[in-house]
Image: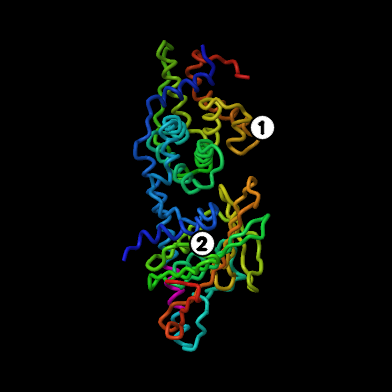
Amino acid sequence: MMSLEDQLATGMREATTGLVPPPDLIDRAARANRRRRNRFAVVASGLSVVAVLAVVYAIAATPKAAPQQPATSPSASPQLLSPMDIAQQAIAVLNGDAVEHVQIVGSFSKSHDQSWTEIWSDPAANNTWIAEPVPHKITAPVGDTVPWMPANLRQKLGGDLRPMGTEQINGRPAVRFHLPAKDAEEDLWVDTATYQVVRLRIVLADSRSSLGDHITTMDFAWFTRTPGAMPSFSFTPPPTTRK
Amino acid sequence: MCRMPAVRALPDAVEATYGPAASSLVSDERKPMTDAYAGLSELMHRRGRDLLAAATLLAGGRTTGEDLLQAALERTMRAWRRIDGDPEAYLRRILYHLAVDGWRLRRRRPELLIEAEPPAQPDSADSIALRHALVQALVQLTPKQRATLVLRFWEQLSEAETAEALGCSPGTVKSTTSRALARLRRIAAPWSSDLDTGVRP
């Protein structure tokens, strides 16, 4: 005679004997995951279109707008938005076609060695310029490309984020988010007024290296690309840049 | 003009210059699915039967069990790059938490609700009928009671391990188990002659 617990355990084994997962279960999960991301992107794209149209209207009303205006204007007072709302707004802004400028500085925690690169990417013209570091180490291809950084930033902002408070980045308030990562510490800053990503820092711990942890800091600037702004928009890569 | 080589090469060039930290700058959107989740496919190949069995017991049926396991896989894919440690443990944790937190069970009743007939006169087939009735009766429990019983009596975890898996105290596991078994015992009353009335320590 068996106890209730033993009868239950045996019954569970009997009820599940012979169960085999369908071979396409992983594919189904991957498709569902992709659909979820696409739905998210569609919503973000819609917000972006509204934001871009608002900027176009604003620039048309003020023809002498400065070329370095933000790609979008905030639709609400930043004080009314939570950090996660700001992250969502940042995703919408990244869906625009702003010209992207990234200054990348590589450094080490135990060394003064640094390397740098500047990248300009114009998604509308399908052009990317890369400023060569000194000495000339990088041999990156230039020319026709698609902006890879906005997609990456959107992905990061759509994942797990931990708001870390507001800090000043280049004299402007920005919300700092910490991104839990498997193999690196990542922090990302979003301007609270323009919702533009202004900085991404990645720290890769390396206890075996005499140089210490590897730190990559990427400072972003986004230039408006609208019909109203383009006549006064002058895109001149520095002399060290080759196309 | 060719786009794809440049798309691949640009992050590679940055990574070559700035080391492996920059590898996280390469978006998952450009990775083939089979490469991106290769470890997960291998895990399902090895442990898929056990995982589906657990999901079936948690969800109350084969079809809903597959749905539950698929939802857990999807959640795991979202965090795939950040999982530090055993991916199976992470997947199982998601599976049980989804089941307990309601998942779709709040909106949809489990699919198996057929009540087993108690015996008129006990015979040798009654033990099988009893076990069948007990498994069927799992769907009448709350999701947390069901998850607790699956962890304790199918996964064979201790109270402490069950508590860790569900993110609650061992005392909660003990009381939940007790209430769930009491409910099953009432359902199994017609088979009382097939049951040892002793209580498992």
* Residue type marked 2: Lys
Task: Please state, as top left, top right, bottom left or bottom right, where the C terminus of chain A lies in the image.
Answer: bottom left
Residue A72 visible somewhere in the drawing: no
| Residue neighbourhood size for the residue with mark 1, other residues' Cα within 10 Å, grouped as few (<14), some (14–19), many (≥20) | few
**Which chain does the numbered disc 2 sit on?**
A
Relative vertical location of residue A109 with respect to residue A242 in this rendering, above or below = above
**Which chain does the numbered disc 1 sit on?**
B
Q: Position of residue B7 (x, y in %)?
A: 40, 60
Q: Give the residue at mark 1.
A: B171
Q: Position of residue B181 (x, y in %)?
A: 56, 26
In front here: B153 or A58?
A58
In front here: B75 or A121?
A121
Residue for point 39% across, 30% down: B114
Give the magenta part as a residue range: A46-55
Predominant SS along the magenta part: helix
* Residue type marked 1: Gly
Q: Give the residue at mark 2.
A: A137
Which SS class for mark 1?
helix
Q: How is the image coloured?
A: rainbow
Q: Position of residue A115 (x, y in %)?
A: 58, 62
Image disc number at residue A90: none
Please identify the quarter of the rendering in which residue B119 is found. top left
In front here: B56 or B47?
B47
